Amino acid sequence: MHDTTAAHHFHAEKNKTVGRFFEHNKRSVFYVALILLFAAFPLTGSSYWIDLGVNIGFYTLLALSLNVILGQAGIFNMGHMAFYGVGAYVTAILNTVWHWPVFWTMPLAGCAAGLFAAIVARPIIHLRGDYLLIVTIGIVEIVRIALLNDIGGLTGGSNGIFGISRPVLFGFKIVKPIHFYYLVWGMVAVSYLLFYMMRRSRFGRALNYIKTDDVAAEGCGIDVAHYKLLAFVLGATWAGMTGSIYAAKMTTIAPESFNFMESCIIFAVVILGGGSQLGVLISALLFIGLPEIFRQFNDFRMLLFGLAMMLMMIWRPQGILPMRPRLYAVSKKLFSGAKESTSKGQEKIA
Amino acid sequence: MEQFLQQLLNGIAVGGIYALVALGYTMVYGVLKLINFAHGDLFTIGAYLGLTLLVSAGIAGALPLFAAILLVFIMVALFVALIGFLLERTAYRPLRSAGRLSAVVSALGASIFFQNAIMLIYEPRVYVFPDFLRPTFTISLFGFTFPGIRLFIVGVSILLMLLLWAFIQKTRVGTAIQAVAIDQDAARLVGINVNKIISLVFLIGPGLGGIAGLMVGLYYGQIDFTMGWGYGLKAFIAAILGGIGNIPGAMLGGFLLGIIEALAAGYISMAWKDAIAFFVLIVILIVRPTGILGERTAEKL
């Protein structure tokens, strides 16, 4: 009798602990499930689905990198494809002309895109939102026209560059869509984590402040132009590295892949996502994935896409998952009135 | 000299078209602070509708050519104005209290929607304006011969701009539009119906844009469903060049951009023509962000 109650008691306790574990680690459980879901996806699908997955992965990477610029720092950038294109072309040129391995070119592609972003953004970063929007459109168009006109005899004009070799990672050659799937989504996971950490850092908090109120931020001693430029360059660098992998996946790149229309779509994906990274991920899945799934309605696909953009904004102008205001732990001593703890509490707030 | 004058007149003709489209951007921006990305596609609708009315509906055959073109200009303006009005009602008005970025995305969505709607209604190919629609007469001035169509386009666009300018400056409703552009709340306080003014702006702007679309068709002789992006962007550059929100600025910016582009295409490089327009834009924004005629105002806190 005594035994059974004890066993019962023990069982209940265990259930409670399991429950509490889920309660406390809801987030971790959710993310582990999400990762498992993405990892298991290729096991079920055909190569068409996997290819689609890779494609969505590229868009997700671009959207996450644009989210740093647009979602976190609030800089209107509608020319993100320019930096993606610069990265892709740097890899393509280094690889086809000087036969550099793709992964070696990746940091360089990122740096080139970042440097390009720094040069073009430096004189314009202080401009008001709408002006910046138009200038970035100008940048993406100028890059496309420059590529089309075969600058330096390196970009191959409207045909682009072909014959880019496949990347090799530790002796393993990445060829099949499924390899690229894991590579791209692995990069998504790493970027997600890094940008998450960045958001919580001093830098990320400064960006958040600038987005909310740049005048007040300036008043608090944040060098607004400097931080904005850093965010812009960081996002562009990421796009450049993504472009590098894109070039290796496609083996052929052409200027038309990096046009204004694509930039608009990435821009819309970020705004529709609402600013949080999970929102951006969901939005990329919805707005890049769904139109692909409805391929058989090819003609109506983009019509519905445009309609969906309008309806989504009317229905939910703040986006799918807006960034929640972050909560900071305030020490309980703060409320008990202990004098010396006040400064401690404030430290945590800051 | 001959080539220079021809390029210049070509630039003025194209500039007049840019200016008409730019007016739509700048007026909407003036009252709503919104970049209406769908404006370029309203312009395309004007071109397609004009072709349909002239050829398929047979207006060109039933009337003398000039009367037919004039009638179709008016019909296109009315129809495109109606679409602009409906667009504002459905896609922008519900978002007026939301952030400006939401409205921008809605505008992009509307643009994609219109572009694909045109593609589905017509076919995804280039449409050619039959030769008999395009005036072929020439006019001799100062010993040079100019194609009549160029002068016709310059004339129509300048006439429309003068009418608009008179409307904005001389009538009560025009003054109300200016008031709403300066301060919506203050305009409301003095009894202006702001919603009506915004609707009116969405009638005038797209109306002018639709006419400009038909003019492009008559001028170049061919249209396609994606042309709205290019012309829309150029016109927006023109609006910024002159000072966004400023009506004479949009006119000046349009002509200026048209001339710069024509001369650059003639004397520098045809292939880099579009890039030069964007380059001019970036230089202007660095040197004088408010545009040529824009007034420098203090940022509101």
Image (tube, rainbow, N blue to C red):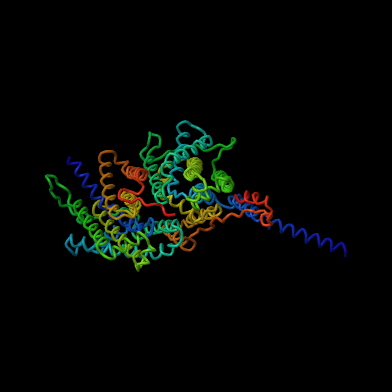
Look at the image and tell me whether residue A249 can be seen.
Answer: no
The image position of residue B21, as x and y in percent, is: 30, 55
Judge from the rendering whether residue B231 lies leftward or rightward of residue A2; answer left or right.
left
Number of numbered discs present?
A: 0
Q: In the figure, B61 relative to B131: above or below?
A: below
Which of B168/A182 is in front?
Answer: B168
Which of A247/B192 is in front?
Answer: B192
Q: Which residue: 88% across, 63% down?
A: A2
Which of B58/A227 is in front?
Answer: A227
Judge from the rendering whether residue A175 lies leftward or rightward of residue A97; answer left or right.
right
The image position of residue B222, as x and y in percent, is: 27, 52
Q: In the figure, B271 relative to A296: above or below?
A: above
Judge from the rendering whether residue A348 lies leftward or rightward of residue B133; answer left or right.
right
Judge from the rendering whether residue B28 lies leftward or rightward of residue A199; answer left or right.
left
The image position of residue B131, as x and y in percent, is: 21, 54
Which of A52/A245 is in front?
Answer: A245
The image position of residue A282, as x and y in percent, is: 54, 55
Look at the image and tell me whether residue A124 can be seen.
Answer: yes
Residue furthest to the left: B143
Point out the image quarter for the N terminus of chain A. Answer: bottom right
Residue furthest to the top: A98
